Image (spheres, rainbow, N blue to C red):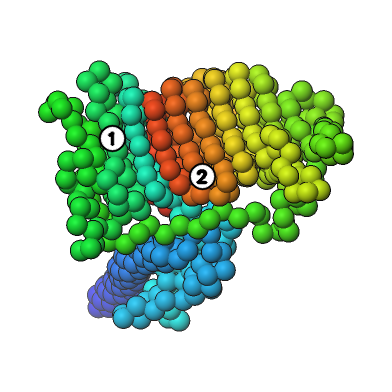
Amino acid sequence: MKISGNIIKEKKLAGNKQTGAALVVIIVSMTIIAILGAGILYLVSSSSFSEVFINNREKAYYLAQAGRQYAKLIINNLPAGDRVAIDAALNGKTFTLSDGNKFYLSSQTDDKRSYLESTGIVNEGTVLETKQKIMFTVESKRFALDVFGVESVQLTSGAIIDSYDSSVGPYNATVGSPAFNKTQKAIVRTNGTADGSINVVYKATNPAQIGGDAVCGPCGPNLEYCDPLEDYGVINAVSLNPAIILITGTRTSASTTQAYSEVLPPGTCTSFYTCGSPLGNTVTVKIKGINYTYLTMTGSGTTSDPHTLNTGVYRTNYFNFNGKTLTINGNVTLIVSEAFTNDSSLITSTGNLNMINASNIYLLPDASLDLYVLRTATFGQDCRINPPCRGGSTAVPCADGLSQTPATALRFLGITTTQLNFNSQETYGGVSAPGAVCSYTAASHFFGTVSCKTITMTGGGIHVDKAFSSTGGGTGAGNVVY
């Protein structure tokens, strides 16, 4: 019986051990399950929160884009170059939508463009608050119009106006080329309502063409003969050959006249005769027995007559480069002013700019040039002004090893007495000279935007840079970099 009792005790002990082991297994299992459950709950919660966050981020981004569109609308409806009005309407402003979400705008505007930030805000003041910010640039209307002739635009002798996108690459009209970059999206405007305000002349061997839309001034009920679709009318583009299209886009009359503002001297200057550092050699002329002096700038490259300009405001009375190169190294304002005698008579040739015989203006990376001309500017044979590659090649990267200079870096600013003549040259930039007579002849090719009082083209081309004129721009390779 004693042996039997021991066996029973051993069985009890074994049973207790098995029970304890089972409890340990159960506890460990429950712990693992709890951990796994917590992990699954965390993953599910994290996934849900991530999805909410992603959705909120997308909403905030689109709110920021809505702020961008709103800013463009405001700027395009305010007078060109009105820096105070633009920043008063946009800078530091918060706009709340009906669902409580918001976008916040900040702006800084100069005479060229507005630099803006738009921040979209979702669920403000909660744990789910999300913000997205975008930075962008809106061109002043002064340079955002494609081609604008206040009174008229005339094309003949094979002249062409078309477009391209410099954020993609340089203009390239070679069909079939991998680098082909030519479109028919130019918008040619005028406030004129007389017959021939936009005139595209047909010639059997060399017809002119607008690759895009033509818009004349408003044809109201009192303008009986103002019909943009009428042959030989306010928009005249009559082709005698059905296969040749002189205007590829639409022909319409604007509902209102196109707003613009006259170009004035830089705001920091009291007049063209007192602002900026004097530049050039002193020239003395005798008029009616009295000596008068003025400054003439040439491209000799001497210490007293430099051909490289660093950041600053400069003025000269006469700019004359013959087979020379002017290099812009910094943010430069160059004013070509006038000089007068004591009896207010204009000294001959002052206020004029003259570049001939393969003269060049090169802008180094991050440089800019505002070129004010009071009288006549003439760009002659084989001149190159702000080309994307200063070495002459259109390859990317440029042959000279420097990055491309944006077209927006060069601004021609013409005063009411100005005449601008572009002849057999290549220019990348913007023209704002609504009081000036502008002519494009022979093999001149202008890449950018043009606004003048009248635009007359007898050959050559204006190639509208849509990345420049669309008041937004791109950031890819090309001639415009924001």
Judging depth in this view, the residue of 208 and 331 nearest the camera is 208
The residue indicated by pointer 1 is 200
Judging depth in this view, the residue of 117 and 139 nearest the camera is 139
**Position of residue 418 in the picture relative to residue 466 (left or right):** right
Report x, y in % for residue 167.
42, 39
**Position of residue 462 in the picture relative to residue 346 (left or right):** left
Report x, y in % for residue 401.
60, 24
Q: Amino acid at mark 1?
A: Val
| Residue at 67% from the left image edge and 59% from the top image edge | 267
Q: Vertical placement of 123 versus 111: above or below?
A: below
Q: Vertical placement of 96 versus 292: above or below?
A: below
Report x, y in % for residue 209.
28, 32
The number of numbered discs placed on residues in the rendered structure image is 2
Judging depth in this view, the residue of 75 and 131 nearest the camera is 75
- Badge 1: residue crowd in 10 Å (few <14, some 14–19, many ≥20): many
| Residue at 34% from the left image edge and 67% from the top image edge | 59
Q: Amino acid at mark 2?
A: Ala
Q: Vertical placement of 182 versus 442: above or below?
A: below
**Which of the numbered marks, if any, corresponds to residue 436?**
2
| Residue at 20% from the left image edge and 63% from the top image edge | 221
